[in-house]
Structures are given as C-alpha cells and as structure tokens.
Amino acid sequence: MSWFGKLKTALQRTREAFGGELETMALARRPVDDELWDDLEEILLAADFGVPTTVKIVDALKVVAKQDRYETSDQVVSRFRRDVQNFLTLPGMTLNVQAKPAVILVVGVNGSGKTTTIGKLATVLRAQRKKVMVVAADTFRAAAAEQLAVWAQRAGAEYVRGAEGSDPSSVVFDGMTAAKARGIDVVLVDTAGRLQTKTNLMEELKKMRRVIEREMGAPPSETLLVVDGTTGQNALSQAKLFNEATQLTGVIVTKLDSTAKGGVLVGIVDQLTVPVKYIGLGEGQDALAPFDPAQFTRALFEVGAAA
C-alpha cells in the first residue's frame, strides 16, 4: 500500500465523521448564518481542533465570507479546506541536518512512542547515507535504553548509553565527544519522558540543551517533540509545556490510527507556530514519513479520496 493509502486508512474514522459532516454541510448549500457558524464550531471541536484554534478559524472565515459575499455553506467549506492546508504549512518543515554533526534532541512523555520514533528516524537517516549515532540519555528506564539499542542495531547506527540512574547530561556529554571523534553526521538524543508537569524533568532538559550548546558551539539543530496523536488535546498541553522548556523546532505525531483525531495537528501548529515534521503510522521501520500538509488534508477531508 502507498503511504497515502496508509494515511487514508489511519484517518478513516476521523475522515468519515469529520470529513463526512463537512461534505454534508457543503452539499446542503445552507445559508451563511449564525446557525451555520455554530455547527461548524461543533464539528471542529469534535475533531480535536481545540477551542482557541476553532475560534480563530471560524472568526477568520466570517471575515472572508463577509468580504467575498459568501451566500452558501459550500463556499465556506471549500475555503475552510484550503485554509487548513495553509495553516499546516510553515517554514522549516524539512529536517535541519546541515551541521556536522547535527544534533537532534528528542523529547516527549513516556508512552508517546518517542524511543521507537528515534529508531525509525535513525533508519530514515541511514537510508540517506548519513552516519548516525543514537544517545540513550533516558537513564531512568533501563528498558528504554535496551529498546533503543535494538533499534540502533537494526538501523546500522552507532550507540552511546550511560549507567542506569546516571546523570543524563553526562551521557549527552559523552555522546557529543564521541560524535566529534568519529565523524558522525547526525546525533539523535533520547531523553527521559516522565510527566511533563514535573519541574525537575524540564530543568534536566534545559541542562542537556546547555551541554549540547557548550560542546558543539551551537544549540541543537533540532529539538523535536514526539506526541501521541490519540491523546487529543492532552498532546497540545504537552507541546506547550515542552516548548516553554526546550524551544521546540518541530513536532512528530505518532500513532495516527483509527482512534486519533486529525484536528489536533492543526491545534499544535496554530498554538505553537512550530511545524509538524514527521508523522508515524504503525510499528514498522518504514512507518515514519515527512509530513505533507496537502496529502494530509486530502486524506482527512476527501471522503472518496483514492489511495
């Protein structure tokens, strides 16, 4: 199956509900009135766009509808679909690996699919003939380091870890030293994923970032947050907290399966002004791909879209 086919299958439930309701609204050619706007708000909230983003989108559509003299709901829905694709299209969507070594700090809560995503990203980069090193700086979960070692071996990436319970920043230091000595192209740093509300975790992330900047002479090339697409608005809450602590440059959304609601991607991009760089579908090594807003919105909206 093509990647678009997989994406379409992953978003099936959301597309049938969300896309179906929009299609019904468009086909009805309803008058553009307060009732239409209220119904559109309900549809967006049900699809996990979140209140602030929903209000922003609907208010902007009201202005356009008035300026362009929209008379029926099909005009509103058509404009909305175009606007969502534009919403999701931001500068810097391509992974920045220009520096040598380029350091990518990967953050996120436990259970988000962070460690698996690092393994898949290592596979993607190795396929591009990059010399990759994976640094296991999550020293609080031995299972995470072991899982990462397996992924690194599969991808053909080099691997650095510390003793269980050791200072994560010291592991990062060791990784930076090794990367420079071995001529590594890209360093992927895994981090602990304890609850995002814990102050000590955020301080730890800031310390790791300082070590990278000191040893490399620059901040990480990327700081990527991995979020579980099935957690809805909780994913947005996580994104805001991690962004405050680590200055995110991008987001990777995992587990976009039949229980995920695609609107949360729009909410994250809107509220953080940070691009979605990759999306993950399933567990396979090839189940991670760069995010394509046009492809995503087509899979999300077009009820009859072909794979």
Image: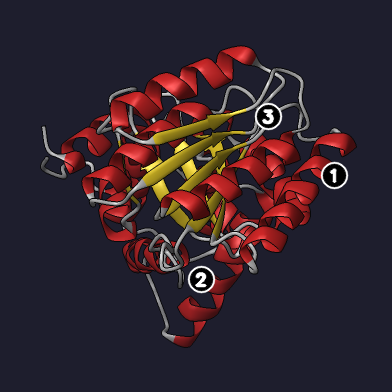
Instruction: Return the mark for residue 192.
Output: none
User: What residue is shown with label 2?
Assistant: 61
Q: Position of residue 39 (x, y in %)?
A: 53, 49
- Is residue 89 visible to the viewer in this orientation of the structure? yes
Q: Residue at x 69, y 40 (%)?
A: 238
Q: Disc number at residue 193? A: 3
Q: Position of residue 217 (x, y in %)?
A: 65, 68
Q: Residues within 10 Å of mark 2 (few under 14, many from 20)?
A: some
What whole-number distance in Å separates the C-alpha atoms at marks 1 and 3? 13 Å
Mark 2: which secondary structure?
helix
Q: Which residue in the rendered view is the most extreme toward the front?
A: 181
Residue found at x 66% / y 30%: 109
**Amino acid carrying mark 1 in the image:** Glu
Find the distance from the CA under tag 2 to the CA under tag 1.
41 Å
Q: Nearer the viewer, residue 94 or 147?
A: 147
Mark 3 surroundings: few (<14), some (14-19) or many (≥20) residues within 10 A? many
Q: Which residue is mark 1?
A: 203
Quadrant in the picture for residue 123? top left
